[in-house]
Amino acid sequence: MPETLESLLWCAALATWLMLFFGITAERLKPLSKLLSHLLEVTFRLRAK
């Protein structure tokens, strides 16, 4: 039983760190995503003219 509890705690800790990592990564990539969408919009606007 203690081994199962220890494994469960390790999985919970890993899940917590992964959620924090992906949350921070997503926040950092938002400006890049906005920049790319703006560049695509300008590119297609120029092609439409």
Image (cartoon, rainbow, N blue to C red):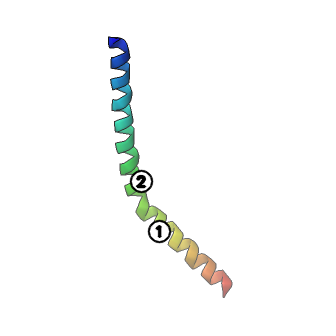
Residue 1 is marked as: none
User: Residue 15: where, in percent of width, then height?
Assistant: 39, 35
User: Residue 38: where, in percent of width, then height?
Assistant: 51, 73
Could you tell me how far apart the alpha carbons at marks 2 and 1 are, in whole angstroms?
A: 14 Å
Three-letter residue code for mark 1? Leu
Residue extending furthest toward the front: 1
Left of 36 or right of it: where is 29? left
The quarter of the picture where residue 3 lies is top left
Crowd class of label 1 (few under 14; some 14 to 19; many from 20; radius 10 Å): few
Q: First in sequence: mark 2 or mark 1?
A: 2
| 2 or 1: mark nearer the eye | 2
Three-letter residue code for mark 2? Ala
- The residue indicated by pointer 2 is 26
Image quarter in which the N terminus is found: top left
Which one is nearer the viewer's eye here, 3 or 43? 3
Q: How many marks?
A: 2
Left of 9 or right of it: where is 33? right
Residue at 67% across / 84% down in the picture? 48
Which one is nearer the viewer's eye here, 27 or 19? 19
Image quarter in which the C terminus is found: bottom right
Residue 35 is marked as: 1
Residue at 56% across / 78% down in the picture? 42
Compared with 2, 39 (above or below) is below
Left of 43 or right of it: where is 3? left
Residue at 61% across / 82% down in the picture? 45
Considering the numbered disc 1 on the image, is that residue within a helix, a strand or a loop? helix
Residue extending furthest toward the bottom: 49
Compared with 14, 35 (above or below) is below
Q: Are marks 2 and 1 in contact (CB under 8 Å)?
A: no
Considering the numbered disc 2 on the image, is that residue within a helix, a strand or a loop? helix
User: Residue 24: where, in percent of width, then height?
Assistant: 35, 50
User: Residue 37: where, in percent of width, then height?
Assistant: 53, 69
